[in-house]
Amino acid sequence: MRKQFELTAVALLLSCLAHLHVSAGKCPHAHVNLETGPIGIASHESCTLAQAPSSYDRAQVDSLDIDAVKADIKHVLTDSKAFWPADFPGMEAHAPEGHYGGLMVRQAWHCSGSYRSWDGRGGCDGARQRFFPEGAWPDNTNLDKARKLLQPIKEKWDVKAPGALSFSDLIVLAGDTAIQAMGGPVLGFCAGRIDDADGSASLELGPTREQQAVAPCTRGQGMCEQPLGQTTMGLIYVDPEGELAVPEPKNTVAGIRSTFARMGMDDKETVALIGGGHAFGKTHGACPTGAGNDPSESPSNPWPGTCGSGSLKGKGPNAFTSGFEGPWTSKPLKWDNEYFKNLVEYDWMLIRGSGGHFQWQPLAKPGATKQPKDVMMLTSDMALLEDPEYVKYVKLFAEDQAELDETFKNAWYKLVTRDMGPYSRCLGKALPPPQPFQRPLPPPPSQLPDFDAVKADVTSLLKADAENGAKFTHLAWQCANTFRATDYAGGCNGARIRFSPQKDWPSNKGLDQVLDLLEPIKAKYDTLSYADLIVLAGTTALEQGASPPLSIPFCGGRTDASNGEGTEELGPRSYMNVSVAISDNTKVMGLTPRERVALAGILRSPSLQRAAGYTDSWNAGGSPSKLTHDYFKVLMDNAWEPTKSAAGVDEYRAVASKQQRFMTPSDEGIRTTPEFAAAAREFAANELRFLQALAAAWVRIMNADRFDGPAGNVCDKPSPS
Ligand SMILES: *[C@@H]1O[C@H](CO)[C@@H](O)[C@H](O)[C@H]1NC(C)=O
């Protein structure tokens, strides 16, 4: 018995990692046929550019000569190509043909800026900017050219150090290198992004059916709210021309604050990122007729441009990207705080630019002697002058270059690294120390406690009260089920469930008392963490709840956080209906529907979970400590009607039952969603299969946050004992 469960768990862990090892050199599938939305990006770029995912190789990533890659990128920055001539030829002596710095900063930013903390989706890890849907967003216009510029570097390193350099790492590194090449500050580089084979993990970012179900834009385009990361679908944050394209700076403030907050940026970070980013490069709107067909219409040659003729048609002086035209500063190839100085030193006049969009032109203030420089601002830039907090930082950065350097450096690293999750997922030779947004945990003690002895103590508690098993199981599940495979946040490591905000969530009501039950055991062992104790107690309860007992592998070494900071966004998300909720929550957790359904069959505590899935055995006076498949039979064999508990909580009541049978909205989601219902029927019919699936899924979710690099898990390593 024991062996069998261990093997199942290991096999599952392996299969979960297997998708990361995609063979190199193949063009996977065409991406036109994804039946997922109004636009699709065809296979052309996918096949010829940036597509073949190289197999990730941890040792290679760790030892990659980042300086050598940066030298290659630096060369590309000033090597103007006819297919997309660089901006600003002749502006700098070292860049006679022009410079791609601004383009590379924009590429890294837009690749990363799709991140949203609501569900952890988006971000540059995966480099899904290469595919539908992100690849066709209007805000990503002409970034196909930026990727084409980087492609030779990708190919070179695929040969030189196979598996070392993903396209997603290359995009971020190109942004970093561009910033440094132009004199800007960079904190460091977290290496280890792994390229996705397609854009499916971004379908919920839209515009797609998936997005409409998970994260609808209910107030309409231009007014989209959380869960969406932007106010306007297809853009990264807000419409730079102003809310609903009305060039009124005041009206844009709320959208900027809201969208930057949706990826965890505060006011100071927001101002530093906007002005720091706009220190570089220029906007492109040399003509009023647009960029031409996007990738859905013209997959092999997207955004060809519509102005000019001959070899410069749509390029260089004829380029159209955002439709605005001009640089923000007079030295767009040099890092400095001129952007902020320009904002405060000039008056600004609304004009219609050459691309037909509203933008702002500088005027000398009354009495000023200097004539304004040839620069511009967007309505979203002007908005920074319309808010007391924003303007405070505009003035600060205009006066204090060092303050800007420090703030921008940290905010940029957060922007491009946030979706990588904890520090333990970062690799490479240029890795800076753990940052607050990575929610660092203390290292495990050198000597772990005697877990067999801990287990014996837990067993005594299980015998003392028949409901304790269900309580321990519930605590461990609540502790672990915040895990998100989208941005690697959450999970039980750290045991942050002991602190606000998690301990205050209604779903965690009563768990403080369960922690009190465990406290004497915690106190008995010097090096025992709450996180390990919580997981071990739940695991032991499940093992001993089954008859005959199960053997579920336990992997210790978790440590405890000292507070609950940074877990606010892990709280319950609300969805359209119970079916979308169970499907999306399962996806975000990185589980299969069958795994999620198996986990619904854990022990449930009548006193902690008044509304949670009473089963026959409980109602017949049986024990909540018995782990059986009764839950699935009750769920699938009854008709249910919605009701409210005495506490006003949504629940479902069995229509024909003489007994009091209840279930929760997520139980109803399982019952009414085909893939989930199929697994529930399987488990209702076969208890052994349920127990096997539960043991494996339990191990996966309990250990999901035990990162060892981007794809590894410390629990996969051979045990030292
Ligand atoms: C739930 O919402 C989705 C998306 O709108 C819809 O396709 C589905 O039919 C709904 N399901 C139920 C049970 O209402």
Image: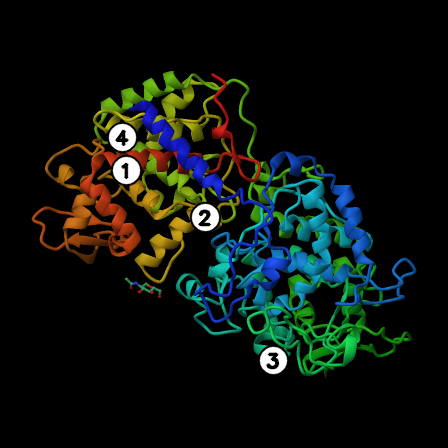
Labels 2 and 3: the sequence-earlier one: 3
Which quadrant contains ligand 1?
bottom left
State the residue lying farthest toward the front: 26
Image coordinates of residue 320 in percent, x first then y, are 70, 75
The amino acid type of the residue labelled 4 equals Gly
Labels 2 and 1: the sequence-earlier one: 2
Of the 4 image quadrants, the one containing the N terminus is top left
The amino acid type of the residue labelled 1 equals Ile
Q: Nearer the viewer, mark 4 or mark 1?
A: 1
**Residue at x 23% of width, y 23% of height:** 464
**How far apart are labels 2 and 3 at the CA level?**
35 Å
Image coordinates of residue 387 in percent, x first then y, are 64, 67
The amino acid type of the residue labelled 3 equals Val
Q: Are marks 4 and 3 in contact (CB under 8 Å)?
A: no
Q: Is residue 35 left or right of residue 334?
A: left
Labels 3 and 1: the sequence-earlier one: 3
Q: Residues within 10 Å of mark 1 (few under 14, many from 20)?
A: many
Q: Which residue is mark 2?
A: 570
Q: Which residue is mark 4?
A: 469
- Whether the residue carrying mark 2 lies under 8 Å from ligand 1 is answered with no
What label sits on residue 246 in the rendered view?
A: 3
Q: Secondary structure at mark 1?
A: loop
**How far apart are labels 4 and 3 at the CA level?**
60 Å
Q: Which residue is mark 1?
A: 602
Q: Is residue 295 left or right of residue 398?
A: left
Q: Nearer the viewer, mark 3 or mark 1?
A: 1
Q: Secondary structure at mark 4?
A: helix
**How far apart are labels 4 and 2 at the CA level?**
26 Å
Q: Residues within 10 Å of mark 2 (few under 14, many from 20)?
A: many
**How far apart are labels 4 and 1 at the CA level?**
10 Å
Q: Are marks 3 and 1 in contact (CB under 8 Å)?
A: no
**Residue at x 57% of width, y 59% of height:** 114
